[in-house]
Image (tube, rainbow, N blue to C red):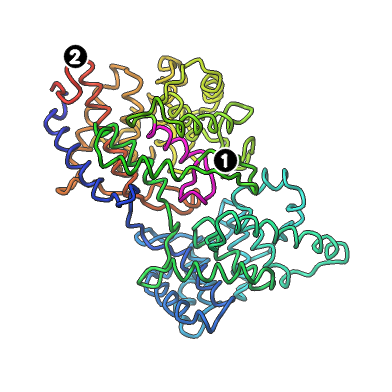
Amino acid sequence: MTAVTAEAVGKALTAGAEALFRRRRPDGAFSDDPPASVLGTAGAVAALHAADPSGCADLVDAGTAWLRRAQHDDGGWGGVVGAGTAVVPTAVAVAALALSAPADSADAIAAGRARLAALGGVDTITDPAISLLCRQLLTMAGMTAEAGPLRRLPLEIVLFDRVRRQRLSFRTAPFVGLALMQADMLPAGRLRRATLRRARPAAVRLLRSIHDHEGRTGALSEDPWPAALVLLGLARSGEAPDIARAVVGWLRRAVRPDGSWDAVSNLDLTRSGYAATGLIAAGYADDPRLHATREFLHAARKTEAFEVLDVPPGGWSYSNARGWPVTLESAEILSALAGLPGAGTDPVLRQGLAWLVGRQDSRGSWSLWVRDTRLANDGPCPAITSQAILALHDAGYPDDHPAIARAAAWLLTRAAPAGTFENLWYRDHTSGTAVVVAALSRVGHARHEVVRRAARWLRDTRLPDGSWGPGDGTGGTVEETSWAVQGLLATGDPDAADAVDRGVAWLVAAAGPDGAWPAARVCNYIRHHMRYPNAVITQALALRTLGEYRRAAATRSGAAPGAVAR
């Protein structure tokens, strides 16, 4: 090493691993301290007030008081605590306060409306679905000037399963909620009313299918925001009162002590998959503390099909065994199981890998939920595809395996003109570019010009202090520095050695005295509009990077992995 000593890397790994293990629960899962969500809280109070204003008055009062306290001095709101003012949370918070506590919130509403106008209003929202959502909530709150024209949602799409999956994907539940809200907001002609008479029962059946799949908990993906949108639709339409009661009960159970709600209430599998891969790379694969984590991951594999999105059993959710199965978390968990003792005879690993191969798109990519969708928030995604490649590679699949070869061929056509790659669920562009570079390099494409150009972009966007941010000149983060170093390390390119050394030195220096690294808001909740931090992912990425760096240095020097040369 040139920029940092082997001793410093070793100390950072030890302290960082212990800091991460302190987040391990007795059941083997890893916990986090997520920030409160303005969207989740605003949606919850509006929905609870609509569904049961007297029975939920305590939750509504506490939630609206929290929203008023969370309002920034400029009159706006951020998506989560600590985030800067943005259009989407400001629009939603203003509407929620006007719907659920207009008298107590008059000053906050006035300031929020003024700030929303100064930000350019909902016309600046680039996601059509989120734009429509904000317009609808503002219209419900009587703010028609801020809302602008309201487009009718085609509830009839629920009559055509394939089209609905391709067009709505994981937004099926909130879409149904929003469409049901429109029942008494937008007039319908005779033909439209006849169509709705067929579509409404089908829409409710979809919600019931989700409700039953989740064990009738009312969680609706364990996310207060879509759960609230469904509850609003059910409350205004009068449909499925049993589901509405269950959602009310879940929101009551999910509320934080301060009266707010999280962005997503349960990311146990997301955190645990990353934590395991980070600790394995740091040299802790044989640590007995990961035994329970392995059992937790085994038990959480889905054994039932998720019919709403036509996903067969065999994968994992981001939350628990009853959650919605996703490719992203499944790939990370498979990489973790492949690195733990007993991988060679692990039937859960083998079955999960077969599921992952079966979820590959016909074009060679992987999407998050629905195969072969072109939906912007589902897939196809270069970063998710890369994580699937890495999972297969980590499990010992050969580089010429058809699934890997097809995925690599697809990735080699997906670079942007600058050489970058997208990442649907983490901030562009460093994360996506680095993950693609790592995946393609590990399956034999390190010298391909597409990979070389992407790696050059990573080197060129390194900040003067040795760190990486999103590639636009803004400050560096632990997460993006970790991704970038992993990508450049995987290429084995000597020209990247200085960038790698300086990135590692920056990571070592960024660790706190307790071994923990500071988390940044790089996880996408609403792409381009709202992000949140995840401390476990941050810790795991840093550990993985330092572990891979130590292993690469040991390989170059011929020493054991724990004895890295300077």
- Where does residue 101 sit, x and y in percent of width and height? 50, 81
Displayed quadrant of residue 539: top left
Question: Hey, what amino acid is under mark 1?
Answer: Pro
The residues bearing labels 2 and 1 have C-alpha atoms spaced at a distance of 44 Å
Residue 403 magenta-drawn? no
Q: Pointer 1: what residue?
A: 313
**Residue 419, placed above or below residue 167:** above
Q: Residue at x 83, y 62 (%)?
A: 192
**Boundaries of the magenta span:** 316-337
Per the image, label 2 sits on a secondary structure element best described as: loop
Displayed quadrant of residue 367: top right
- Where does residue 342 sit, x and y in percent of width and height? 35, 29
Instruction: Tell which of 47 and 447 is nearer to you.
Output: 47
Whether residue 146 is visible to the viewer of this picture, yes or no, is no
Q: Mark 2: give few (<14), some (14-19) or many (20+) Cα within 10 Å.
A: few
Q: Quadrant of the C terminus?
A: top left
Question: Hey, what amino acid is under mark 2?
Answer: Gly
Instruction: Tell which of 28 and 438 is nearer to you.
Output: 28
Q: Does residue 453 appear left or right of residue 8 in this picture? A: right
Q: Pointer 2: what residue?
A: 558
**Residue 402, placed above or below residue 382:** above
Q: Quadrant of the N terminus?
A: top left
- Where does residue 268 sit, x and y in percent of width and height? 40, 50
Nearest to N terminus: mark 2 or mark 1: 1
Which of label 2 and label 1 is nearer to you?
Answer: 1
- Where does residue 235 sit, x and y in percent of width and height? 63, 73
Q: Residue at x 59, y 58 (%)?
A: 123
